[in-house]
Amino acid sequence: TPHLQIKDLSVAIEDKQILKGLNLEIKGGEVHAIMGPNGTGKSTLASAIMGHPKYEVTGGSITLNGEDVLEMEVDERARKGLFLAMQYPSEISGVTNADFLRSALNARQEEGKEISLIKFIRQMEKQMEILEMDQSFSHRYVNEGFSGGEKKRNEILQMMMLKPSIAILDEIDSGLDIDALKIVARGVNELRGSEMGVLMITHYQRLLNYIKPDFVHVMMQGRIVKSGGPELALKLEEKGYDWIKEELGIKD
Ligand code: ADP
Ligand code: MG
Ligand code: MG
């Protein structure tokens, strides 16, 4: 089963140190939630794992099943099963959803073992049904003209098609009404318990009612400062973050 290990990770953006010695371990089948105030580096962590060039790793290590992720090119990370559902999904004009998904899938297959068109379409239609997406979405350009909620659903469609070993979901709940949130959660829960490990970044405990985490981590000032179970998220919802700052002697 997959095993992502992050040790003492430090990351800078334009010479500004954002992550300062972050430790996190995710195994297949586990769901981890990271919560924390805005600007603490949650999305930075996601981008660093995926290898976004703007984020410079200044220390520490990331391994997937013992292999050095930091040595891998961006597309290699995806091939190895790392997946990010982005906080702000981008539009890809001129490329239809179906074409995008099919090439992403085929990029992960060995030469000559590409998925047949019929099989692909059948799979895509099945997942779109689970996500209550209109079939017309497969012929539209990726995210172009999609509402915020449709973009999030589309990220989950990608996840369901690619079946990653580690899925990072960055604020997949932001901008969703309760019905859309339930549908997105259904998609994640569908794959859950398989070999996939999940890292969910969120501000709101509400999401965790629908995707129950095994572990909840609090991130502040570029590190994970506290970890616990689902009860930690409830406490954060009720009391905010100040008590943690006091407990740990963190000043803003
Ligand atoms: P979070 O996701 O926890 O809200 P981010 O990781 O997005 O936090 O941001 C952490 C810090 O890094 C913030 O101070 C933010 O302004 C800065 N930052 C993030 N992305 C960039 C970027 N592409 N260029 C410059 N600064 C950035
Ligand atoms: Mg933010
Ligand atoms: Mg963010």
Image: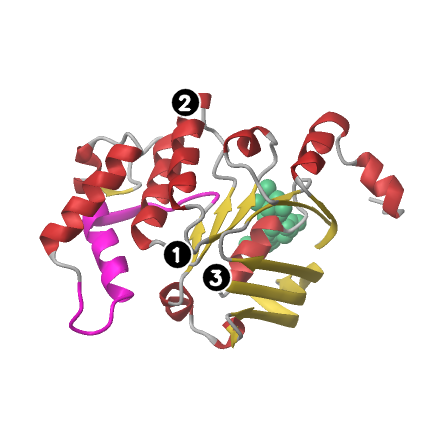
User: From the viewer's perspective, is residue 211 above or below residue 158?
Assistant: above
Q: Nearer the viewer, residue 76 or 213?
A: 213
Q: Quadrant of ligand 3?
A: top right
> Where's residue 213, x and y in %?
57, 41
Crowding at dot 2, Cα within 10 Å, few <14 / some 14-19 / many 20+, comes out as few
Q: Nearer the viewer, residue 170 or 96?
A: 170
Instruction: Please name the residue shown 49% across and 34% down the image.
Output: 173
Q: How is the image coloured?
A: secondary structure
Inspect the image, locate mark 1, and give the three-letter code of the amino acid beneath it: Pro
Inspect the image, locate mark 3, and give the three-letter code of the amino acid beneath it: Met
Image quadrant occupied by the C terminus? top right
User: From the viewer's perspective, is residue 5 above or below residue 41?
Assistant: below
Question: Dot 2: what SS?
Answer: helix
Q: How much space separates mark 1 and mark 2, taking CA atoms? A: 25 Å
**Residue to which mark 1 is pinned:** 164
Magenta region: which residues?
Answer: 87-114
Residue 27, image quadrant: bottom right
